[in-house]
Image (tube, grey):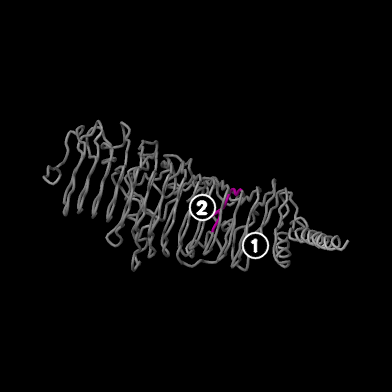
Amino acid sequence: MIRKKHLLLPACILLACSLASCAKKTTDRYSITDYGAVGDGKTINTKAFIEAIKACSVSGGGTVIVPPGTYVTGAFTLLPDITLHLEPGATIKGSTDLEDYMIDGNRFGLIRAKDAKNIAITGPGTIDGSGTSFMDTTTMRNYPDWQAPDLDPKYTRQGQDYMHKKFGTQDGPYVYHARPGRIIRLLNCKNVLLRDITITDAPSWTVHFDTCKDVTVTGIRIKNSLLVPNSDGIHCTSCKNVQISDCDISGGDDSIAITCIGDRHHQDILGGEPSTAASSENITVTNCTLQSRSAGVRVGYTGGDIKNCTFKNLTVYESNRGLLVNVRGYGSVENVSFSDITIETRLHTGHWWGQAEPIHVSAVPGKADIEKLGQIKNVRFSNIIADCENGIVVFGCEESIIQDLTFENVKLKLRDGPLNKSYGGNIDLRTAADLSSAVFEHDIPGLYARYVDGLKINGLEIDFPEELPPFFNHALHCEYFTNLKIDALKARQPQLAGVGAVIALNNGSNVTINNCRAPQGTDTFLKHAALAGKITFEKNDLANAKKAVEPEDQRFR
């Protein structure tokens, strides 16, 4: 009997603890409908969201539930230790009244958090930003109805016809006036999770992590209108330790952007407080599908340093650019890897950045008063397959020479497109200090590189169609370079008529060209001028080339 009493006591204690645990879980969940929310797609529920979040926070945190229904709301703030969970059939829909987005005198998007820890937005529900309602859907940003402030068409191949509406307006973008800020803007937050949600119709940036740490984004869908400008998918500004995986993103700007830019120049259109320009570090993006009217992935811009980023197993399709690494201010980009990526790019009508480059790496001043321009160092592209209407662009400058850039096992399939005559044959370096170098006429090689030190090209294959516009000139063109290594290149010149060469080199030093093969149809394999330093030219199969080297040079034997 004594032994039974001792056994009975722990069982009672366990039962009491279990009941207490159940009671706690019940109070940890706060449905917005208990605070007056009505999911009829009409009622403004901002107050209900605020009150439910406040009650959850007062109790020490927990989960705020959005049940099935469509809940219209303006801006609200997510507090620490809170998960906002959208149940199946639940939609948070942004108000179409700009006044509903004001918080403390600033205009925001839907969901904001500042200086918060342990926050999450989860569930199979949807967040609808109502972005198209803030657009002028009857007017597109095409010349001459709309004149771009960031380029001068006289410098383009087409002159005043560049971006002209007579070539079509089907790709937008819409003209907008005032609009709300980002749908989700998290500033200086830590331990953040976004999981499983769907976000649609953003009026500007969709998800913005600003000076955040320890961020996980997995399994989310972002489906914005491709005609709405600036509708970035996921934008990380000055963030550390970010993991993005298994996401499907499309919209009218960069699908994923990693920057360190202070947002003061975006504040007018995006709303909210400006961010700082601290560094971005330790970013990993894997297993995502991306569609963009700018770049599938963008790394860098004008602010602080960006380093230690990995992008792997991605698909980029129907985009203006595939992968973009750029410097336009004092910040540098270092130690970035892109691998196992499939890219499809084409030219688009209207005012979008990009010229259908599968890969673009550039460092030029974005403003005339920059004291010291940052650098791009140690960036690698490997196992890339691209179907594109333009070649790869690597564009450094005397103030910022791109260093230690590698292309390994990259396969390009170039094709002509319906907009090549009206938009093609230009390089786009926006933003640029001088409009003459913003969008300007330039011949198009399969890969063009200038002002680069330590460029390594290993296993590059380029497939050109039988016909391309005449501005496609070489397979590979490098100038103003040092320490160039080309290994196992497989390509002919773009024009079957023989204009151009497989490789064109000028104003460079220290060249290694090994193990390359000239396929059928090759005219001149190598054209060169003003080369200095050590030249290594070995084990190249040039049997199919009409001419191996022009001009002939004993160093290339």
Name the residue carrying label 2.
Answer: 232
The quarter of the image holding the C terminus is top left
* Image spot of residue 227 (x, y percent): 52, 46
Compared to 40, does 418 lie above or below? above
Compared to 32, does 503 lie above or below? above
- In this view, the residue farthest toward the right is 1
Near-viewer residue (72 or 193):
193
Number of other residues with Cα within 10 Å of mark 1, as a class: few under 14, some 14 to 19, many 20 or more: many
- Element class at badge 2: loop
Task: Name the amino acid, label 1.
Answer: Leu
Q: Give the residue at x 76% y 55%.
A: 33
Name the residue carrying label 1.
Answer: 78
- In this view, the residue farthest toward the left is 554
* Image spot of residue 358 (x, y percent): 39, 45
- Element class at badge 1: loop
Q: Give the residue at x 41% y 44%.
A: 164
Task: Name the amino acid, label 2.
Answer: Asp
Compared across the picture, whether 56 is left or right of 524 comes to right
The quarter of the image holding the N terminus is bottom right
Residue 328, can we see it?
yes
Marks 2 and 1, how far apart at CA: 21 Å
Near-viewer residue (105 or 451):
451
Q: Which residues are magenta?
A: 198-208
Between marks 2 and 1 in the image, the one whose residue lies nearer the viewer: 1
The picture quadrant where one finds residue 45 is bottom right
* Image spot of residue 266 (x, y percent): 49, 61
Number of other residues with Cα within 10 Å of mark 2, as a class: few under 14, some 14 to 19, many 20 or more: many
Total numbered labels placed on residues in the image: 2
Compared across the picture, whether 384 is left or right of 52 comes to left
Marks 2 and 1, the one that precedes in the sequence: 1
Compared to 110, does 145 lie above or below? above
